[in-house]
Amino acid sequence: MSQRVHSLAVIGGDGIGPEVTAAALEVVAAAGVSFDVEVFDLGAARYLRDGFVLDDATLERLRGFDAIMLGAIGPAIGDTRIPGGTLERGLLLRLRFGLDLYINYRPFHGVEGSLAEGCDFAIVRENTEGPYAGEGGTLRRGTPYEVATQGSVNTRFGVERCVRYAFERAAASARPKVTLVHKTNVLTFAGDLWSRVMAEVHAEYPGVEVDYNHVDAACIYLVEDPARYNIIVTDNLFGDILSDLAGSVSGGIGYAASANLNPTRSGASLFEPVHGAAHDIAGLGRANPLACVSSAVMMLEHLGEDEAAARIARAVRDFHGDAAQLGTAGITRQLLERL
Ligand code: IPM
Ligand code: MN
């Protein structure tokens, strides 16, 4: 067990966010890792209270932590008081872009009874470019001649560092294989860049097997033959969509974890479950904290707390029972007992 005390920013956020981060913090503490925690009140509730989303000073403070844990951000479905994009672009994407969290690493382990039962694979999603970059605009809005464009930004630098990360992960794994997922037959400019970078980086990792799937075909394979995958590398939007599908076939989005990584460590990395705020079950003790706990496992690995990470990961894998029945407290108690 390490003697270090890590500084941790916790953004519980909205809905079930604060419940799952609290459970994850309880579990990491029980595994013997010490954190100096500072809570940041950010998200929909904060915005509705005083209009604050995120400013430069707060972003800079967040950069200085050893890690950031985020629960979930977003208003309840049907709540129209917050214009779409306010929190997504103003908070989540601002954190990803501003802290240069250029990898969104999303591991999947098919739980018992799921379509992907027994499968282990991960999506390496480019996290700062693609259609998320914000390129584009509107002309003649509200007229019959309206024009809206939203370009996909793919830089040599951005694609290469993402693909390189995927190969490094694969090379260190038991089944070294990287599958590029794209739509090179239609998105020919971006697809050409991604394909050439794949081939070039592959030359440096001859021991890693490579494959390519069009994104539509990947949707079929994820359902019918998920065992074919080890590391999937893909752009920001394909990675967003595929990771929901991957979560679903692996046992439900309630289990899906993610790490928004700055592998250069020029600032804090951010760890969050893939699921959202689920306002409908907030405050009822029904939230499944396993995705947040698994995100915390990746945080511990990032911080060099490998032993604690492995113990918690084992407890999560050995978890059994009806998550809905057990509720947040029941699931957390079972994890604590297994530690
Ligand atoms: C995710 C989410 C975000 C994304 C949204 C909330 C901006 O769907 O983390 O997958 O699209 O990346
Ligand atoms: Mn998503």
Image (spheres, rainbow, N blue to C red):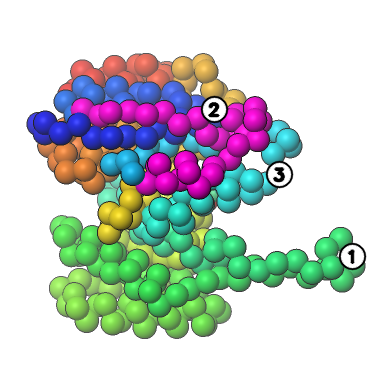
Image coordinates of residue 30 in percent, x first then y, are 21, 22
In the rendered structure, the answer to whether residue 85 lies left or right of residue 120 reads right
Q: Which residue is pictured at 73% across the width and 35% down the height?
A: 81
Image coordinates of residue 74 in percent, x first then y, are 58, 37
Residue 83: assigned label: 3
Mark 2, other Cα within 10 Å: few <14 / some 14–19 / many ≥20: many
Q: Earlier in the sequence, mark 1 or mark 3?
A: 3
**Which quadrant would the N terminus be assigned to in this image?**
top left
Ligand 1 within 8 Å of disc 3? The answer is: no
> Which residue does the numbered mark 1 point to in the structure image?
143
**Disc 2 to disc 3, C-alpha distance:** 18 Å
Residue 246: assigned label: none
Q: Farthest residue in the front direction?
A: 57
Mark 1, other Cα within 10 Å: few <14 / some 14–19 / many ≥20: few
Look at the image and tell me whether residue 58 can be seen: yes
Instruction: Specify the amino acid type for callout 2.
Output: Gly
Please tell me which residue lies in front, 130 or 110. 130
**Which quadrant would the C terminus be assigned to in this image?**
top left
- Start and end of the magenta stretch? 34-63
> Which residue does the numbered mark 2 point to in the structure image?
15
Q: Earlier in the sequence, mark 2 or mark 1?
A: 2
Please tell me which residue lies in front, 246 or 13. 13
CB atoms of marks 2 and 3 within 8 Å = no
**Disc 1 to disc 3, C-alpha distance:** 21 Å
Image coordinates of residue 195 in percent, x first then y, are 39, 80
Q: Secondary structure at mark 2?
A: loop
